[in-house]
Image: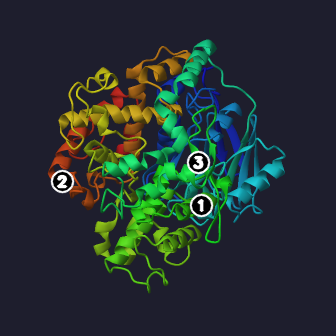
Amino acid sequence: MVNGFANKILRVDLSRGKTWTEEPPATFYRRYMGGQGFIAYYLLRGTAKGTDPLGPGNVLIFAAGALTGVPIPGSGRSAVGGKSPLTGGYGEADVGGFFGAELKHASYDAVVIEGKSPDPVYLWINNGTVDIRPANHLWGMLNFECQQAIVEELGDERVRLAMIGPAGEKLVRFACIMNDLSHAAGRTGLGAVMGSKNLKAVAVRGTGKVAIADPEGVKALAIWMRDHWREKAEDLSLHGSAGIVPEMNTASVFPTRNFKDGQFEGADRISGQTMKETILADQGGCYACPIRCKRVVEVKNDRYQVDGAYGGPEYETIAAFGSDCGVDDLEGIAKANEICNAYGADTISTGGMIAFSMECFEEGLLSTRDTEGLELRFGNTEAMVELTLQICQRRGFGNILAEGPDYAISKIGPLSRRFSMDVKNQNLPMHECRARHGLGLGYAVSPTGADHIHNFWDNVVANDPPSEEAQELGLYECMPQTVLNPQKVRAYMYGTNWAWIHNHLGSCIYVPWSRDQIVALVRAITGWQTNVWELLKVAERGVTLSRVFNMREGFTRSDDVLPERMTTPVRKYPGIAPEVFEESLSTFYGMMGWNPETGLPTLDKLRELDVEWAAQHLS
Protein backbone atom coordinates (compact mmCIF):
# COMPACT_ATOMS: atom_id res chain seq x y z
CA MET A 1 0.00 0.00 0.00
CA VAL A 2 1.26 3.47 -0.94
CA ASN A 3 0.50 6.22 1.56
CA GLY A 4 -1.20 9.27 0.10
CA PHE A 5 -3.23 7.21 -2.38
CA ALA A 6 -6.32 5.01 -2.34
CA ASN A 7 -4.32 2.46 -4.36
CA LYS A 8 -7.23 1.77 -6.69
CA ILE A 9 -8.13 2.88 -10.21
CA LEU A 10 -11.77 2.56 -11.25
CA ARG A 11 -12.28 1.38 -14.85
CA VAL A 12 -15.62 1.92 -16.60
CA ASP A 13 -16.76 0.63 -20.00
CA LEU A 14 -19.98 2.45 -20.85
CA SER A 15 -20.55 0.44 -24.02
CA ARG A 16 -20.81 -2.77 -22.05
CA GLY A 17 -22.12 -1.24 -18.84
CA LYS A 18 -19.24 -2.81 -16.90
CA THR A 19 -16.99 -1.52 -14.10
CA TRP A 20 -13.89 -3.03 -12.51
CA THR A 21 -10.99 -2.03 -10.30
CA GLU A 22 -7.24 -2.07 -10.92
CA GLU A 23 -4.60 -1.92 -8.20
CA PRO A 24 -1.35 -0.64 -9.74
CA PRO A 25 2.00 -1.41 -8.11
CA ALA A 26 3.75 1.09 -5.84
CA THR A 27 6.21 1.96 -8.62
CA PHE A 28 3.32 3.22 -10.78
CA TYR A 29 2.34 5.77 -8.16
CA ARG A 30 5.87 7.01 -7.61
CA ARG A 31 6.62 7.19 -11.32
CA TYR A 32 3.48 9.18 -12.28
CA MET A 33 2.16 10.63 -8.95
CA GLY A 34 -1.37 11.29 -10.18
CA GLY A 35 -3.16 14.00 -12.15
CA GLN A 36 -1.39 14.81 -15.38
CA GLY A 37 0.91 11.78 -15.06
CA PHE A 38 -2.02 9.37 -14.83
CA ILE A 39 -3.79 11.07 -17.74
CA ALA A 40 -0.79 10.92 -20.08
CA TYR A 41 -0.23 7.25 -19.20
CA TYR A 42 -3.81 6.05 -19.69
CA LEU A 43 -4.48 8.23 -22.72
CA LEU A 44 -1.44 7.00 -24.59
CA ARG A 45 -2.00 3.36 -23.69
CA GLY A 46 -5.78 3.43 -23.91
CA THR A 47 -6.39 5.00 -27.32
CA ALA A 48 -5.41 4.06 -30.84
CA LYS A 49 -3.73 6.46 -33.27
CA GLY A 50 -6.34 8.55 -35.06
CA THR A 51 -9.07 7.94 -32.50
CA ASP A 52 -12.07 10.21 -32.98
CA PRO A 53 -12.14 12.48 -29.90
CA LEU A 54 -15.94 12.28 -29.94
CA GLY A 55 -16.07 8.56 -30.64
CA PRO A 56 -16.33 5.62 -28.22
CA GLY A 57 -12.60 4.87 -28.63
CA ASN A 58 -11.58 7.96 -26.67
CA VAL A 59 -11.00 7.63 -22.93
CA LEU A 60 -11.97 10.16 -20.28
CA ILE A 61 -9.80 10.18 -17.17
CA PHE A 62 -10.60 11.82 -13.84
CA ALA A 63 -7.39 11.81 -11.80
CA ALA A 64 -6.48 12.95 -8.30
CA GLY A 65 -2.90 13.47 -7.14
CA ALA A 66 -0.67 12.70 -4.19
CA LEU A 67 -1.85 15.80 -2.30
CA THR A 68 -5.52 15.67 -3.32
CA GLY A 69 -7.84 15.05 -0.39
CA VAL A 70 -5.21 15.49 2.32
CA PRO A 71 -6.49 18.12 4.82
CA ILE A 72 -4.04 20.87 3.92
CA PRO A 73 -4.57 24.17 2.05
CA GLY A 74 -4.42 23.81 -1.73
CA SER A 75 -5.21 20.08 -1.87
CA GLY A 76 -8.63 20.37 -3.50
CA ARG A 77 -7.41 20.13 -7.08
CA SER A 78 -7.64 17.26 -9.54
CA ALA A 79 -7.33 16.80 -13.28
CA VAL A 80 -9.46 15.44 -16.11
CA GLY A 81 -8.14 14.41 -19.50
CA GLY A 82 -8.79 12.77 -22.84
CA LYS A 83 -8.13 13.36 -26.51
CA SER A 84 -9.28 16.92 -27.11
CA PRO A 85 -12.10 17.54 -29.60
CA LEU A 86 -10.84 21.14 -29.83
CA THR A 87 -7.14 20.55 -30.62
CA GLY A 88 -7.17 16.93 -31.77
CA GLY A 89 -4.30 16.28 -29.36
CA TYR A 90 -3.57 15.86 -25.69
CA GLY A 91 -6.44 17.27 -23.63
CA GLU A 92 -6.26 18.16 -19.96
CA ALA A 93 -8.10 20.52 -17.62
CA ASP A 94 -7.27 21.07 -13.96
CA VAL A 95 -9.90 22.10 -11.46
CA GLY A 96 -10.38 22.94 -7.80
CA GLY A 97 -13.31 22.46 -5.50
CA PHE A 98 -14.23 19.27 -3.65
CA PHE A 99 -14.78 16.56 -6.27
CA GLY A 100 -11.18 15.29 -6.39
CA ALA A 101 -10.93 15.06 -2.61
CA GLU A 102 -14.27 13.23 -2.44
CA LEU A 103 -13.03 10.75 -5.07
CA LYS A 104 -9.98 9.91 -2.96
CA HIS A 105 -12.14 9.59 0.14
CA ALA A 106 -14.41 7.22 -1.81
CA SER A 107 -11.45 4.84 -2.36
CA TYR A 108 -10.28 5.76 -5.89
CA ASP A 109 -7.29 7.68 -7.23
CA ALA A 110 -8.70 7.91 -10.74
CA VAL A 111 -11.61 6.92 -12.94
CA VAL A 112 -10.84 5.80 -16.50
CA ILE A 113 -13.95 5.78 -18.71
CA GLU A 114 -14.15 4.21 -22.17
CA GLY A 115 -16.90 3.41 -24.66
CA LYS A 116 -20.27 5.09 -25.10
CA SER A 117 -23.53 4.37 -23.35
CA PRO A 118 -26.50 3.70 -25.66
CA ASP A 119 -28.57 6.09 -23.50
CA PRO A 120 -27.73 8.94 -21.11
CA VAL A 121 -26.34 7.75 -17.77
CA TYR A 122 -24.56 9.02 -14.71
CA LEU A 123 -21.95 7.26 -12.61
CA TRP A 124 -22.56 6.89 -8.87
CA ILE A 125 -19.48 6.15 -6.75
CA ASN A 126 -20.24 5.60 -3.07
CA ASN A 127 -17.40 4.53 -0.77
CA GLY A 128 -16.01 1.96 -3.17
CA THR A 129 -19.29 0.79 -4.66
CA VAL A 130 -20.12 1.79 -8.24
CA ASP A 131 -23.39 2.00 -10.11
CA ILE A 132 -24.23 3.17 -13.65
CA ARG A 133 -27.63 4.86 -13.43
CA PRO A 134 -30.08 6.10 -16.08
CA ALA A 135 -29.94 9.84 -16.83
CA ASN A 136 -32.56 10.33 -19.54
CA HIS A 137 -34.48 12.50 -17.10
CA LEU A 138 -31.39 14.67 -16.54
CA TRP A 139 -30.42 15.19 -20.18
CA GLY A 140 -30.98 18.77 -21.26
CA MET A 141 -30.92 20.16 -17.73
CA LEU A 142 -28.80 23.14 -16.76
CA ASN A 143 -26.20 22.31 -14.15
CA PHE A 144 -28.04 23.67 -11.10
CA GLU A 145 -31.16 21.68 -11.98
CA CYS A 146 -29.04 18.59 -12.62
CA GLN A 147 -27.25 18.88 -9.30
CA GLN A 148 -30.51 19.32 -7.40
CA ALA A 149 -32.07 16.32 -9.11
CA ILE A 150 -29.13 13.97 -8.45
CA VAL A 151 -28.72 15.05 -4.82
CA GLU A 152 -32.44 14.50 -4.23
CA GLU A 153 -32.33 11.14 -6.00
CA LEU A 154 -29.35 9.93 -3.94
CA GLY A 155 -30.65 11.40 -0.70
CA ASP A 156 -27.32 12.87 0.39
CA GLU A 157 -26.57 16.60 0.30
CA ARG A 158 -22.83 15.95 0.59
CA VAL A 159 -22.60 14.25 -2.79
CA ARG A 160 -20.02 15.92 -5.05
CA LEU A 161 -20.57 16.14 -8.79
CA ALA A 162 -18.59 16.49 -11.99
CA MET A 163 -21.19 17.19 -14.67
CA ILE A 164 -21.92 18.63 -18.06
CA GLY A 165 -24.64 21.01 -19.14
CA PRO A 166 -26.26 21.41 -22.56
CA ALA A 167 -23.02 22.73 -24.09
CA GLY A 168 -21.36 19.38 -23.42
CA GLU A 169 -24.41 17.48 -24.60
CA LYS A 170 -24.41 19.47 -27.84
CA LEU A 171 -20.67 18.85 -28.28
CA VAL A 172 -19.50 22.44 -28.17
CA ARG A 173 -15.80 21.98 -28.90
CA PHE A 174 -14.75 23.92 -25.80
CA ALA A 175 -17.44 22.61 -23.45
CA CYS A 176 -16.16 22.12 -19.93
CA ILE A 177 -16.90 19.85 -16.99
CA MET A 178 -18.33 21.65 -13.97
CA ASN A 179 -17.60 20.53 -10.43
CA ASP A 180 -20.33 21.68 -8.05
CA LEU A 181 -21.57 24.53 -10.28
CA SER A 182 -18.70 27.01 -9.88
CA HIS A 183 -15.46 25.04 -10.35
CA ALA A 184 -14.69 24.51 -14.03
CA ALA A 185 -12.40 21.98 -15.66
CA GLY A 186 -12.45 24.49 -18.45
CA ARG A 187 -9.92 23.92 -21.16
CA THR A 188 -9.57 21.59 -24.20
CA GLY A 189 -13.26 20.66 -24.58
CA LEU A 190 -13.51 17.65 -22.28
CA GLY A 191 -17.17 18.40 -21.57
CA ALA A 192 -17.84 17.47 -25.19
CA VAL A 193 -15.99 14.17 -24.69
CA MET A 194 -18.24 13.47 -21.72
CA GLY A 195 -21.28 14.39 -23.78
CA SER A 196 -20.19 12.13 -26.64
CA LYS A 197 -20.22 9.22 -24.20
CA ASN A 198 -23.78 10.03 -23.06
CA LEU A 199 -22.35 10.57 -19.58
CA LYS A 200 -24.22 13.37 -17.81
CA ALA A 201 -22.40 13.31 -14.48
CA VAL A 202 -20.10 11.51 -12.09
CA ALA A 203 -21.48 11.64 -8.55
CA VAL A 204 -19.16 10.79 -5.66
CA ARG A 205 -19.54 10.32 -1.93
CA GLY A 206 -16.70 9.20 0.30
CA THR A 207 -16.27 9.09 4.06
CA GLY A 208 -12.81 7.56 4.14
CA LYS A 209 -9.51 9.30 4.81
CA VAL A 210 -6.24 9.40 2.92
CA ALA A 211 -3.56 7.30 4.62
CA ILE A 212 -0.63 9.52 5.64
CA ALA A 213 2.87 8.35 6.51
CA ASP A 214 3.69 11.21 8.89
CA PRO A 215 0.45 12.79 10.20
CA GLU A 216 2.28 15.10 12.61
CA GLY A 217 4.54 16.38 9.82
CA VAL A 218 1.51 17.15 7.63
CA LYS A 219 -0.27 18.80 10.56
CA ALA A 220 2.72 21.05 11.28
CA LEU A 221 2.84 22.23 7.68
CA ALA A 222 -0.91 22.84 7.64
CA ILE A 223 -0.68 24.92 10.81
CA TRP A 224 2.18 26.94 9.33
CA MET A 225 0.10 27.79 6.26
CA ARG A 226 -2.93 28.60 8.41
CA ASP A 227 -0.83 31.16 10.26
CA HIS A 228 1.06 32.61 7.27
CA TRP A 229 -1.10 32.52 4.13
CA ARG A 230 -2.17 36.15 4.55
CA GLU A 231 1.40 37.35 4.03
CA LYS A 232 1.19 36.53 0.31
CA ALA A 233 -2.45 35.73 -0.45
CA GLU A 234 -4.60 38.17 1.54
CA ASP A 235 -5.49 40.28 -1.50
CA LEU A 236 -6.45 37.11 -3.34
CA SER A 237 -8.91 36.36 -0.55
CA LEU A 238 -10.28 39.91 -0.43
CA HIS A 239 -10.64 40.57 -4.16
CA GLY A 240 -10.32 37.19 -5.89
CA SER A 241 -8.05 36.62 -8.84
CA ALA A 242 -9.60 39.70 -10.52
CA GLY A 243 -7.86 41.80 -7.90
CA ILE A 244 -4.89 41.97 -10.28
CA VAL A 245 -6.85 43.90 -12.92
CA PRO A 246 -5.58 47.39 -11.92
CA GLU A 247 -1.99 46.14 -11.77
CA MET A 248 -2.27 44.39 -15.14
CA ASN A 249 -3.81 47.46 -16.74
CA THR A 250 -1.17 49.83 -15.37
CA ALA A 251 1.55 47.51 -16.66
CA SER A 252 -0.09 47.49 -20.13
CA VAL A 253 -0.56 43.72 -20.09
CA PHE A 254 -4.38 43.62 -19.83
CA PRO A 255 -5.61 42.03 -23.10
CA THR A 256 -7.93 44.53 -24.74
CA ARG A 257 -10.12 44.30 -27.87
CA ASN A 258 -8.84 40.92 -29.03
CA PHE A 259 -5.27 41.61 -27.89
CA LYS A 260 -4.98 44.73 -30.02
CA ASP A 261 -4.02 46.71 -26.93
CA GLY A 262 -2.71 46.13 -23.41
CA GLN A 263 -4.66 48.84 -21.60
CA PHE A 264 -8.41 49.19 -21.17
CA GLU A 265 -10.01 52.48 -20.26
CA GLY A 266 -12.78 50.65 -18.37
CA ALA A 267 -10.48 48.45 -16.27
CA ASP A 268 -11.40 49.99 -12.92
CA ARG A 269 -15.08 49.32 -13.56
CA ILE A 270 -14.53 45.56 -13.90
CA SER A 271 -11.84 44.91 -11.28
CA GLY A 272 -12.07 42.60 -8.30
CA GLN A 273 -12.05 45.67 -6.09
CA THR A 274 -15.14 47.06 -7.82
CA MET A 275 -16.79 43.64 -7.69
CA LYS A 276 -16.30 43.57 -3.92
CA GLU A 277 -18.01 46.94 -3.56
CA THR A 278 -20.92 46.19 -5.90
CA ILE A 279 -22.16 42.71 -6.80
CA LEU A 280 -20.16 40.43 -4.46
CA ALA A 281 -22.50 38.47 -2.19
CA ASP A 282 -20.13 35.94 -0.61
CA GLN A 283 -16.84 34.10 -0.97
CA GLY A 284 -16.37 30.46 -1.89
CA GLY A 285 -13.42 28.13 -1.68
CA CYS A 286 -12.02 24.66 -2.12
CA TYR A 287 -11.46 21.67 0.11
CA ALA A 288 -9.42 22.47 3.27
CA CYS A 289 -8.35 25.90 2.01
CA PRO A 290 -8.64 29.06 4.15
CA ILE A 291 -8.01 31.54 1.33
CA ARG A 292 -11.51 31.34 -0.17
CA CYS A 293 -10.58 33.14 -3.38
CA LYS A 294 -13.74 32.14 -5.26
CA ARG A 295 -16.31 34.87 -5.90
CA VAL A 296 -20.06 34.54 -5.37
CA VAL A 297 -22.00 37.32 -7.10
CA GLU A 298 -25.67 38.22 -7.37
CA VAL A 299 -27.40 40.62 -9.74
CA LYS A 300 -31.12 41.39 -9.53
CA ASN A 301 -32.34 44.15 -11.80
CA ASP A 302 -34.35 44.70 -14.95
CA ARG A 303 -31.37 43.94 -17.22
CA TYR A 304 -29.87 40.82 -15.69
CA GLN A 305 -30.61 38.21 -13.08
CA VAL A 306 -27.44 36.42 -11.91
CA ASP A 307 -27.74 33.49 -9.49
CA GLY A 308 -25.01 33.22 -6.84
CA ALA A 309 -25.22 29.43 -7.01
CA TYR A 310 -22.96 29.63 -10.08
CA GLY A 311 -20.24 31.56 -8.23
CA GLY A 312 -18.78 34.57 -9.97
CA PRO A 313 -16.24 35.62 -12.58
CA GLU A 314 -12.52 35.17 -11.94
CA TYR A 315 -9.71 37.09 -13.63
CA GLU A 316 -9.68 35.07 -16.86
CA THR A 317 -13.43 35.51 -17.25
CA ILE A 318 -13.32 39.22 -16.41
CA ALA A 319 -10.70 39.79 -19.10
CA ALA A 320 -12.19 37.43 -21.71
CA PHE A 321 -15.72 38.87 -21.60
CA GLY A 322 -14.59 42.30 -20.41
CA SER A 323 -11.49 44.03 -21.72
CA ASP A 324 -10.91 41.58 -24.59
CA CYS A 325 -14.43 42.34 -25.84
CA GLY A 326 -14.13 46.03 -24.95
CA VAL A 327 -16.90 45.60 -22.35
CA ASP A 328 -16.77 47.53 -19.05
CA ASP A 329 -20.15 46.31 -17.74
CA LEU A 330 -19.48 44.13 -14.69
CA GLU A 331 -23.09 42.93 -14.47
CA GLY A 332 -23.02 41.84 -18.12
CA ILE A 333 -19.75 39.97 -17.55
CA ALA A 334 -21.27 38.26 -14.51
CA LYS A 335 -24.23 37.18 -16.65
CA ALA A 336 -21.95 35.71 -19.33
CA ASN A 337 -20.08 33.83 -16.60
CA GLU A 338 -23.35 32.47 -15.20
CA ILE A 339 -24.43 31.29 -18.67
CA CYS A 340 -21.14 29.46 -19.18
CA ASN A 341 -21.30 27.77 -15.78
CA ALA A 342 -24.95 26.83 -16.23
CA TYR A 343 -24.44 25.38 -19.72
CA GLY A 344 -20.87 24.18 -19.13
CA ALA A 345 -18.57 26.14 -21.46
CA ASP A 346 -15.00 27.40 -21.06
CA THR A 347 -15.15 31.14 -20.39
CA ILE A 348 -11.69 31.78 -21.88
CA SER A 349 -12.52 30.21 -25.25
CA THR A 350 -16.06 31.58 -25.30
CA GLY A 351 -14.87 35.13 -24.64
CA GLY A 352 -11.96 34.70 -27.03
CA MET A 353 -14.23 33.55 -29.85
CA ILE A 354 -16.54 36.52 -29.28
CA ALA A 355 -13.62 38.98 -29.28
CA PHE A 356 -12.38 37.39 -32.52
CA SER A 357 -15.79 37.76 -34.14
CA MET A 358 -16.06 41.37 -32.96
CA GLU A 359 -12.82 42.26 -34.72
CA CYS A 360 -13.94 40.43 -37.83
CA PHE A 361 -17.17 42.43 -37.72
CA GLU A 362 -15.42 45.77 -37.30
CA GLU A 363 -12.98 44.89 -40.11
CA GLY A 364 -15.85 44.18 -42.50
CA LEU A 365 -15.41 40.40 -42.69
CA LEU A 366 -18.79 39.89 -41.02
CA SER A 367 -22.04 41.79 -41.26
CA THR A 368 -25.41 41.63 -39.55
CA ARG A 369 -26.51 39.24 -42.32
CA ASP A 370 -23.95 36.73 -41.04
CA THR A 371 -24.73 37.31 -37.37
CA GLU A 372 -28.53 37.31 -37.70
CA GLY A 373 -28.76 40.95 -36.69
CA LEU A 374 -26.18 41.07 -33.91
CA GLU A 375 -24.03 44.24 -33.96
CA LEU A 376 -20.78 42.58 -32.93
CA ARG A 377 -18.87 45.71 -32.06
CA PHE A 378 -16.38 45.98 -29.24
CA GLY A 379 -18.13 47.27 -26.13
CA ASN A 380 -21.58 45.93 -27.02
CA THR A 381 -22.54 44.18 -23.78
CA GLU A 382 -25.90 42.93 -25.01
CA ALA A 383 -24.35 41.34 -28.11
CA MET A 384 -21.64 39.71 -25.99
CA VAL A 385 -24.17 38.16 -23.61
CA GLU A 386 -26.48 37.05 -26.43
CA LEU A 387 -23.63 35.46 -28.39
CA THR A 388 -22.45 33.63 -25.25
CA LEU A 389 -25.92 32.10 -25.00
CA GLN A 390 -25.98 31.26 -28.72
CA ILE A 391 -22.65 29.44 -28.46
CA CYS A 392 -23.80 27.41 -25.46
CA GLN A 393 -27.10 26.55 -27.18
CA ARG A 394 -25.49 26.00 -30.60
CA ARG A 395 -27.84 28.27 -32.45
CA GLY A 396 -27.47 31.18 -34.85
CA PHE A 397 -23.98 32.51 -35.49
CA GLY A 398 -22.97 30.95 -32.17
CA ASN A 399 -23.19 27.52 -33.76
CA ILE A 400 -20.24 28.41 -36.00
CA LEU A 401 -18.16 29.76 -33.12
CA ALA A 402 -18.96 26.66 -31.04
CA GLU A 403 -16.75 24.64 -33.40
CA GLY A 404 -13.64 26.61 -32.43
CA PRO A 405 -11.21 28.90 -34.29
CA ASP A 406 -10.25 26.78 -37.31
CA TYR A 407 -13.85 26.06 -38.30
CA ALA A 408 -14.92 29.66 -37.76
CA ILE A 409 -12.06 30.85 -39.98
CA SER A 410 -13.10 28.39 -42.70
CA LYS A 411 -16.57 29.95 -42.67
CA ILE A 412 -15.61 33.61 -42.33
CA GLY A 413 -12.70 33.44 -44.75
CA PRO A 414 -8.89 33.17 -44.70
CA LEU A 415 -8.42 36.90 -44.01
CA SER A 416 -9.84 36.28 -40.53
CA ARG A 417 -6.88 34.06 -39.60
CA ARG A 418 -4.83 37.05 -38.46
CA PHE A 419 -7.51 37.91 -35.90
CA SER A 420 -7.60 34.49 -34.25
CA MET A 421 -5.64 34.46 -30.98
CA ASP A 422 -5.15 30.73 -30.62
CA VAL A 423 -2.48 28.04 -30.36
CA LYS A 424 -3.37 24.56 -31.59
CA ASN A 425 -6.96 25.82 -32.00
CA GLN A 426 -7.27 26.81 -28.32
CA ASN A 427 -7.75 30.48 -27.51
CA LEU A 428 -5.03 32.29 -25.58
CA PRO A 429 -5.52 32.89 -21.88
CA MET A 430 -5.76 36.49 -20.74
CA HIS A 431 -2.04 37.12 -20.18
CA GLU A 432 0.00 39.19 -22.63
CA CYS A 433 3.03 37.22 -23.79
CA ARG A 434 4.56 40.14 -25.71
CA ALA A 435 5.52 41.44 -22.27
CA ARG A 436 6.79 38.02 -21.13
CA HIS A 437 8.53 36.20 -23.94
CA GLY A 438 9.14 33.02 -21.97
CA LEU A 439 5.39 32.82 -21.38
CA GLY A 440 4.95 33.07 -25.16
CA LEU A 441 7.26 30.11 -25.73
CA GLY A 442 5.13 28.26 -23.18
CA TYR A 443 1.92 29.04 -25.04
CA ALA A 444 3.43 27.65 -28.23
CA VAL A 445 4.86 24.38 -26.91
CA SER A 446 2.08 23.51 -24.45
CA PRO A 447 0.66 20.08 -25.38
CA THR A 448 -2.87 21.29 -24.64
CA GLY A 449 -2.71 24.45 -26.72
CA ALA A 450 -2.19 27.85 -25.10
CA ASP A 451 -2.32 27.61 -21.31
CA HIS A 452 -1.15 29.80 -18.44
CA ILE A 453 -1.35 27.45 -15.46
CA HIS A 454 1.39 25.03 -16.52
CA ASN A 455 3.57 27.87 -17.76
CA PHE A 456 6.52 30.08 -16.81
CA TRP A 457 6.36 33.65 -15.55
CA ASP A 458 9.34 35.69 -16.73
CA ASN A 459 9.24 37.98 -13.70
CA VAL A 460 10.67 35.09 -11.63
CA VAL A 461 14.10 35.80 -13.13
CA ALA A 462 13.62 39.48 -13.98
CA ASN A 463 14.97 40.75 -10.65
CA ASP A 464 18.68 41.36 -10.05
CA PRO A 465 19.57 39.03 -8.52
CA PRO A 466 16.80 36.46 -9.12
CA SER A 467 15.00 35.04 -6.09
CA GLU A 468 16.67 32.41 -3.94
CA GLU A 469 14.22 29.80 -5.25
CA ALA A 470 15.30 30.61 -8.82
CA GLN A 471 18.96 30.38 -7.88
CA GLU A 472 18.34 26.98 -6.28
CA LEU A 473 17.57 25.76 -9.82
CA GLY A 474 20.79 27.27 -11.17
CA LEU A 475 19.18 30.43 -12.52
CA TYR A 476 21.69 33.00 -11.32
CA GLU A 477 21.42 35.85 -13.82
CA CYS A 478 18.82 38.58 -14.26
CA MET A 479 16.89 38.11 -17.50
CA PRO A 480 14.57 40.89 -18.72
CA GLN A 481 11.00 39.78 -19.36
CA THR A 482 11.15 40.60 -23.08
CA VAL A 483 14.30 38.60 -23.74
CA LEU A 484 14.13 35.14 -25.31
CA ASN A 485 17.62 33.61 -25.45
CA PRO A 486 19.16 30.26 -24.46
CA GLN A 487 19.37 31.35 -20.82
CA LYS A 488 15.67 32.24 -20.79
CA VAL A 489 14.82 28.94 -22.51
CA ARG A 490 16.65 27.07 -19.74
CA ALA A 491 14.77 29.09 -17.14
CA TYR A 492 11.52 28.30 -18.93
CA MET A 493 12.29 24.57 -19.04
CA TYR A 494 12.99 24.37 -15.29
CA GLY A 495 10.15 26.71 -14.37
CA THR A 496 7.46 25.05 -16.43
CA ASN A 497 8.43 21.56 -15.28
CA TRP A 498 7.91 22.77 -11.73
CA ALA A 499 4.57 24.28 -12.77
CA TRP A 500 3.54 20.91 -14.24
CA ILE A 501 4.24 19.11 -10.94
CA HIS A 502 1.26 20.89 -9.38
CA ASN A 503 -0.95 19.23 -12.02
CA HIS A 504 0.47 15.86 -10.99
CA LEU A 505 0.14 16.35 -7.24
CA GLY A 506 -3.24 18.10 -7.20
CA SER A 507 -1.87 21.21 -5.50
CA CYS A 508 -3.02 24.78 -6.10
CA ILE A 509 -0.53 27.38 -7.33
CA TYR A 510 -2.42 30.13 -5.47
CA VAL A 511 -1.51 28.70 -2.07
CA PRO A 512 1.96 30.11 -1.28
CA TRP A 513 3.81 26.89 -0.52
CA SER A 514 7.54 27.13 -1.20
CA ARG A 515 9.26 24.52 -3.32
CA ASP A 516 10.86 23.01 -0.20
CA GLN A 517 7.48 22.85 1.52
CA ILE A 518 5.96 20.99 -1.45
CA VAL A 519 8.78 18.46 -1.17
CA ALA A 520 8.21 18.22 2.59
CA LEU A 521 4.49 17.64 2.03
CA VAL A 522 5.08 14.83 -0.45
CA ARG A 523 7.55 13.25 1.96
CA ALA A 524 5.22 13.51 4.95
CA ILE A 525 2.20 12.22 3.01
CA THR A 526 3.83 9.33 1.15
CA GLY A 527 6.85 8.47 3.25
CA TRP A 528 9.05 8.67 0.17
CA GLN A 529 12.42 10.39 0.70
CA THR A 530 11.84 12.44 -2.41
CA ASN A 531 13.49 15.70 -3.49
CA VAL A 532 13.14 18.52 -6.02
CA TRP A 533 15.08 16.57 -8.65
CA GLU A 534 12.68 13.61 -8.53
CA LEU A 535 9.61 15.82 -8.72
CA LEU A 536 11.02 17.69 -11.71
CA LYS A 537 11.64 14.37 -13.43
CA VAL A 538 8.08 13.21 -12.72
CA ALA A 539 6.81 16.38 -14.39
CA GLU A 540 9.21 16.02 -17.34
CA ARG A 541 8.02 12.42 -17.78
CA GLY A 542 4.40 13.55 -17.96
CA VAL A 543 5.14 16.39 -20.39
CA THR A 544 7.18 14.10 -22.64
CA LEU A 545 4.43 11.47 -22.73
CA SER A 546 1.99 14.24 -23.67
CA ARG A 547 4.38 15.21 -26.48
CA VAL A 548 4.55 11.60 -27.66
CA PHE A 549 0.75 11.52 -27.80
CA ASN A 550 0.58 14.67 -29.92
CA MET A 551 3.32 13.52 -32.28
CA ARG A 552 1.54 10.19 -32.72
CA GLU A 553 -1.61 12.11 -33.66
CA GLY A 554 0.21 14.01 -36.41
CA PHE A 555 1.39 17.19 -34.70
CA THR A 556 4.60 18.73 -36.01
CA ARG A 557 6.88 21.65 -35.26
CA SER A 558 4.51 23.87 -37.26
CA ASP A 559 1.91 23.45 -34.51
CA ASP A 560 4.23 25.04 -31.93
CA VAL A 561 3.56 28.56 -33.13
CA LEU A 562 2.12 31.84 -31.83
CA PRO A 563 -0.57 34.00 -33.44
CA GLU A 564 0.85 36.52 -35.91
CA ARG A 565 -0.23 39.40 -33.67
CA MET A 566 2.25 38.27 -31.01
CA THR A 567 5.11 39.24 -33.34
CA THR A 568 4.00 42.90 -33.34
CA PRO A 569 4.53 45.47 -30.53
CA VAL A 570 1.89 46.37 -27.96
CA ARG A 571 2.31 49.58 -25.99
CA LYS A 572 5.88 49.61 -24.60
CA TYR A 573 6.54 45.94 -25.33
CA PRO A 574 8.14 44.53 -28.49
CA GLY A 575 6.65 41.60 -30.29
CA ILE A 576 8.37 38.23 -30.23
CA ALA A 577 10.58 38.25 -33.33
CA PRO A 578 9.86 35.15 -35.48
CA GLU A 579 13.54 34.35 -36.04
CA VAL A 580 14.27 34.59 -32.31
CA PHE A 581 11.26 32.42 -31.53
CA GLU A 582 12.29 29.72 -34.05
CA GLU A 583 15.83 29.60 -32.69
CA SER A 584 14.52 29.36 -29.13
CA LEU A 585 12.13 26.60 -30.14
CA SER A 586 15.04 24.50 -31.43
CA THR A 587 16.98 25.24 -28.27
CA PHE A 588 14.07 24.14 -26.11
CA TYR A 589 13.66 20.91 -28.07
CA GLY A 590 17.35 20.16 -27.63
CA MET A 591 17.29 20.87 -23.90
CA MET A 592 14.29 18.57 -23.48
CA GLY A 593 15.98 15.71 -25.30
CA TRP A 594 13.70 16.08 -28.31
CA ASN A 595 14.88 16.23 -31.90
CA PRO A 596 15.84 19.91 -32.43
CA GLU A 597 14.32 19.92 -35.92
CA THR A 598 11.07 18.05 -35.36
CA GLY A 599 10.44 18.13 -31.63
CA LEU A 600 10.12 14.35 -31.56
CA PRO A 601 11.28 12.88 -28.21
CA THR A 602 14.36 10.75 -28.77
CA LEU A 603 14.62 7.12 -27.75
CA ASP A 604 17.45 8.02 -25.37
CA LYS A 605 15.23 10.58 -23.64
CA LEU A 606 12.42 8.05 -23.25
CA ARG A 607 14.93 5.62 -21.77
CA GLU A 608 16.30 8.27 -19.42
CA LEU A 609 12.76 8.98 -18.18
CA ASP A 610 12.08 5.24 -17.80
CA VAL A 611 9.23 5.24 -20.32
CA GLU A 612 10.84 3.39 -23.21
CA TRP A 613 7.49 1.68 -23.73
CA ALA A 614 6.23 4.92 -25.26
CA ALA A 615 8.60 4.55 -28.23
CA GLN A 616 6.18 2.08 -29.86
CA HIS A 617 3.77 5.00 -30.34
CA LEU A 618 6.28 6.92 -32.45
CA SER A 619 6.89 4.29 -35.13
Alpha-carbon neighbours of circle 1 within 10 Å: few (<14), some, or many (≥20)? many
Give residue 187's position: percent from left, percent from top.
Answer: 49, 52
Q: Which residue is mark 3?
A: 295
The answer to whether the residues at label 2 and label 3 have Cβ atoms under 8 Å apart is no
Q: Which mark is drawn over residue 168?
A: 1
Q: Residue furthest bottom?
A: 369
Whichever of labels 2 and 1 marks the residue nearer the N terminus, that label is: 1
* Residue in the foreground of this view, choosing between 310 and 291: 291
Q: Is residue 76 left or right of residue 263?
A: right
Q: Is label 2 or label 1 in front?
A: 2
Amino acid type, mark 3: Arg
Q: CA distance from mark 2 to mark 3?
A: 39 Å
Residue at x 44% of width, y 84% of height = 368
Tell me if I can see residue 15 in this picture: no
Q: Number of numbered discs present?
A: 3
Q: Which residue is mark 2?
A: 578
Give residue 289's position: percent from left, percent from top.
Answer: 60, 32
